[in-house]
Image (cartoon, grey):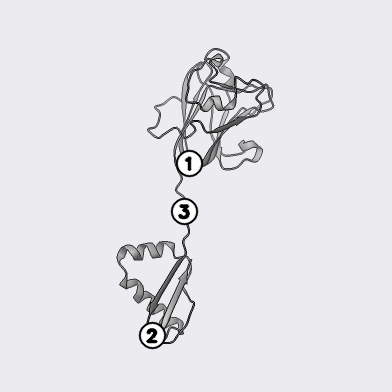
Amino acid sequence: MNGAISLQSNVALRKIATQSSSSYPTFLAPFATDGNRNSNIHAMSCSYTDYYFKPWWRVDLLIEYQISSVVITNRGDCCPTRIDGAEIRIGNSLENNGNNNPRCAVITDIPAGSSSTFSCDMIGRYVNVVIPKNGSVLTLCEVEVYGVPVPVTKKINLRVKFHTSEDTIDSTTRHNVFQQFLSALTNEMVSALKLYWTQQPELEHENKGGSSELCGV
């Protein structure tokens, strides 16, 4: 479907691209991510595969992205219907060269030399375009992928040491002491502590009426 391009950046621009076959040095896979929408294949800005069993093209975005849309520019000087039936697939797997990843859309038609936008709302590192039939040629004059990086969740180790006069050998007392400790912190520190605390604290050194050290991961 046709539509306006998102204000997000094209995260496929000059990223690593490969395809099922590359017999022609002037029609390589990276030409479809060079930022040039020129639809004349002889301008050396389009990718082109041989006649192949289910020909495919793939770009590696290097990290996971929340992908909102994919824009594909079709060849303009010849054979625009060759792209009909191609599938856009997005995901993190390289099984079957990435062609088994979830499907975003099926391309029913892109007019010669035109660019069409396909909404996806999917997460993935790899974006594939594959024609799921035999004896086909896949030509792409530009593939643009719009999205934002997926936030990386980090795990931290937290070690807290404090002094108490309570008997911390008793589990109930130890729990009460820990709750008192939390209440003494600022709201911001409490939020951060609760966010990363994934298990009940364990007492590393138990000294009645002495120093206690609570450890969590």
How many marks can you see? Answer: 3
Q: Secondary structure at mark 2?
A: loop
- Would you call the spot at circle 2 few (<14 residues within 10 Å), some (14-19), or many (20 or more)? some
Residue 51: quarter of image? top right
Q: Disc 2 vs disc 1: Cβ atoms closer than 8 Å?
A: no
* Residue at (66, 37) in percent of width and height: 96
129 left or right of 181?
right
26 relative position to 37: left or right:
right
The amino acid type found where label 1 is placed reads Tyr
Q: Looking at the picture, tell me which residue is in the foreground, 192 or 132.
A: 192
Q: Nearer the viewer, residue 4 or 23?
A: 23
Give percent across and percent down for residue 123: 50, 42
Tags 3 and 1 in contact by the CB under 8 Å rule?
no
Distance of label 2 from label 1 (alpha carbons): 50 Å
Q: Position of residue 132 (x, y in %)?
A: 64, 29
Q: Quadrant of residue 184?
A: bottom left
Under mark 3, the amino acid is: Thr
| Mark closer to the chain start, 3 or 1 | 1
Residue at (39% x, 65% y) in the render: 193
The residues bearing labels 3 and 1 have C-alpha atoms spaced at a distance of 14 Å
Q: Residue at x 44, y 48 (%)?
A: 151
Q: Nearer the viewer, residue 156 or 113?
A: 156
Q: What kind of element bears circle 3?
A: loop
The residue beneath circle 2 is: 166
Q: Secondary structure at mark 1?
A: strand
User: Measured from the top left, where is residue 117 in percent x and y?
Assistant: 46, 27
Q: Which residue is mark 3?
A: 153
Give the residue at mark 1.
65
